[in-house]
Image (spheres, rainbow, N blue to C red):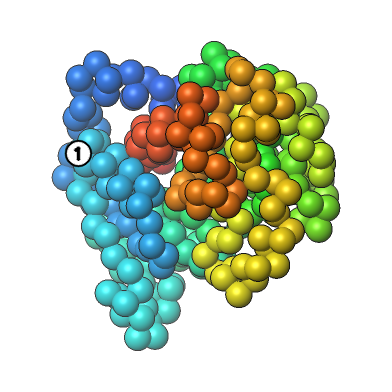
């Protein structure tokens, strides 16, 4: 049984296949082929421990466009909220649904779900990885730069979070240069070591730096919130640590006129990014958000066919 818990387990050619399928499905959608009934009548369970806008809506829309019926639920709506084990819950869901996508607090929950599932389990976000977001990021950069490979992107800010990690992973698969720009306290050399095989295979370059000037000449500048769900108690310390890494007009000027601005959203405007950047002519965040739907369709199609 194939799952999508992280992109680490996928080979470079598989990641490229997912993106080419995503682009094809988007092209068909924009041409008016909104409904592509590959899996009519099948059920996909969407399980959310955390609030969600883009992930919930994009997965629901993707499932519906493929002819599937999405069923959204949360721990309090299942017996898991009253003590039923993840294992028992997954054994039951596997009898009803064709796939389950889950947004969870701890990545270990996804791993346990997958161990006891006979249907594909898809990571809709965990504390360590966000592979669905990375696929949408890659599709957006491909569209904007005209290149699937040899892309240069700078992730500025919390370089230890799940979005930055997944961006580095997909960059390693596609032969990108990913510059992780943030304070040294957040660097993880372990991530670079884990990607060594892909780096050698694709010629990608992934590195950490604390210099904003390393954003120069990139195809994209990416940031994310400084205070993710679960880090509220550390809010003031994180603001102090990350305030030098706000993406503003100066950073975009360093990056250059060809660079697009990326953000997985929701954005804390005035914190990690200024209004003039996210609403400016270089912003690609709304394309990014739309692409969550098209890449989700590709993931469902790949795992279920």
100 over 245 or under it: above or below: below
**What residue do we see at 65% from left, 68% from top?**
236
Residue 240 rendering spot, x and y as whole percentages: 72, 61
Relative side of 152 to 222, left or right: right
Residue 14 rendering spot, x and y as whole percentages: 55, 30
Helix, strand or loop for disc 1: loop
Return the residue at label 1.
67
Decide which of 27, 18 is in the foreground and name it.
27
**What residue do we see at 53% from left, 34% from top?**
277
Decide which of 94, 27 is in the foreground and name it.
27
Q: Residues within 10 Å of mark 1 (few under 14, many from 20)?
A: some
146 over 282 or under it: above or below: above
Q: Residue furthest bottom?
A: 82
119 over 281 or under it: above or below: below
Decide which of 153, 277 is in the foreground and name it.
277
51 over 134 or under it: above or below: below
Relative side of 195 to 2, left or right: right
Residue 136 rendering spot, x and y as whole percentages: 47, 35
Total number of numbered labels? 1
Relative side of 182 to 79, left or right: right
**What residue do we see at 27% from left, 23% from top?**
29
Question: Would you say residue 230 is visible in this rendering?
Answer: yes
């Amino acid at each position: 049984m194939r799952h999508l818990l992280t992109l680490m387990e996928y080979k470079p050619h598989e990641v490229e296949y997912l993106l080419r399928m995503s682009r094809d499905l988007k092209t068909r959608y924009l041409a008016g082929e909104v409904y592509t009934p590959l899996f009519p009548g099948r059920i996909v369970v969407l399980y959310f421990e955390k609030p969600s806008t883009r992930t919930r809506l994009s997965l629901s829309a993707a499932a519906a466009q493929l002819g599937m019926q999405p069923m959204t639920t949360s721990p309090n709506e299942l017996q898991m909220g009253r003590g039923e084990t993840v294992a028992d819950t997954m054994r039951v869901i596997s009898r009803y649904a064709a796939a389950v996508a889950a947004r969870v607090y701890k990545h270990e929950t996804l791993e346990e779900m997958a161990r006891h599932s006979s249907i594909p389990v898809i990571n809709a976000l965990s504390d360590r990885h966000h592979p669905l977001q990375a696929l949408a990021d890659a599709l957006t950069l491909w569209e904007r730069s005209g290149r699937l490979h040899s892309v240069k992107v700078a992730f500025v800010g919390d370089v230890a979070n799940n979005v930055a990690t997944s961006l580095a992973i997909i960059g390693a698969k596609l032969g990108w240069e990913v510059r992780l720009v943030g304070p040294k306290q957040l660097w993880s050399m372990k991530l670079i070591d884990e990607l060594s095989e892909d780096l050698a295979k694709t010629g990608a370059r992934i590195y950490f730096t604390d210099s904003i000037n390393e954003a120069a000449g990139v195809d994209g500048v990416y940031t994310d919130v400084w205070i993710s769900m679960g880090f509220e108690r550390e809010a003031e310390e994180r603001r102090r640590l990350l305030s030098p890494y706000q993406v503003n007009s100066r950073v975009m000027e360093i990056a250059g006129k060809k660079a697009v601005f990326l953000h997985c959203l929701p954005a804390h405007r005035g914190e990690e990014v200024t209004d003039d950047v996210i609403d400016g002519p270089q912003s690609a965040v709304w394309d990014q958000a739309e692409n969550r739907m098209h890449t989700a369709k590709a993931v469902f199609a790949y795992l279920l066919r």
